[in-house]
Image (tube, rainbow, N blue to C red):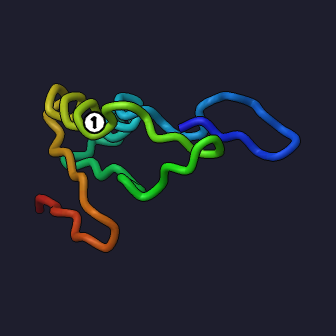
Amino acid sequence: MIARFEGHEANVPVTLTSEQAVETAAALGASTACSIHYALFDNPPAYVDQSGMAERFARAAQERGITPALVADGGTVPLDH
């Protein structure tokens, strides 16, 4: 996502990319990773969704042996115990 605010346009990412999120989950030893705020926001020019986020997140997670969880707002995140 890129954030632009009135009077300030940093034009830098303000969230992790799909791949960065999975790498962080892997570093923490997670077996499941949930994409927070998945498909909730897309409000150009202030907030722009990343292209192909769901596919990239799922692919990166599977490559690291992590279960990707892409759930709708209010949905349940499946956890392995």
Q: Quadrant of residue 75?
A: bottom left
| Residue 15 as seen in the image, left or right of residue 60 | right
| Residue 58 as seen in the image, left or right of residue 43 | left
Classify mark 1: residues with Cα within 10 Å, few (<14), some (14-19) or many (20+).
many
* Residue at screen point 33% across, 41% down: 25
Please state which of residues 62 and 13 is positioned toward the viewer in this rendering.
13
Task: Please provide percent x and percent y for residue 26.
Answer: 29, 35
| Residue 25 as seen in the image, left or right of residue 11 | left
Q: Quadrant of residue 54?
A: top left
Task: Please provide percent x and percent y for residue 73.
Answer: 34, 67
| Residue 20 as seen in the image, left or right of residue 43 | left
Residue furthest right in the image: 7
Under circle 1, the secondary element is helix
Task: Please provide percent x and percent y for residue 45.
Answer: 63, 41
Give the tally of numbered discs.
Answer: 1
Task: Please provide percent x and percent y for residue 49.
Answer: 46, 41
* Residue at screen point 59% across, 32% down: 13
* Residue at screen point 20% across, 37% down: 58
Image quarter (top left, top right, bottom left or bottom right) of the C terminus: bottom left
Amino acid found under the numbered disc labelled 1:
Phe
* Residue at screen point 31% across, 73% down: 74
Position of residue 14 relative to residue 70, above or below, is: above
Please state which of residues 66 and 60 is positioned toward the viewer in this rendering.
60
Residue furthest front in the image: 44
* Residue occupied by mark 1: 57
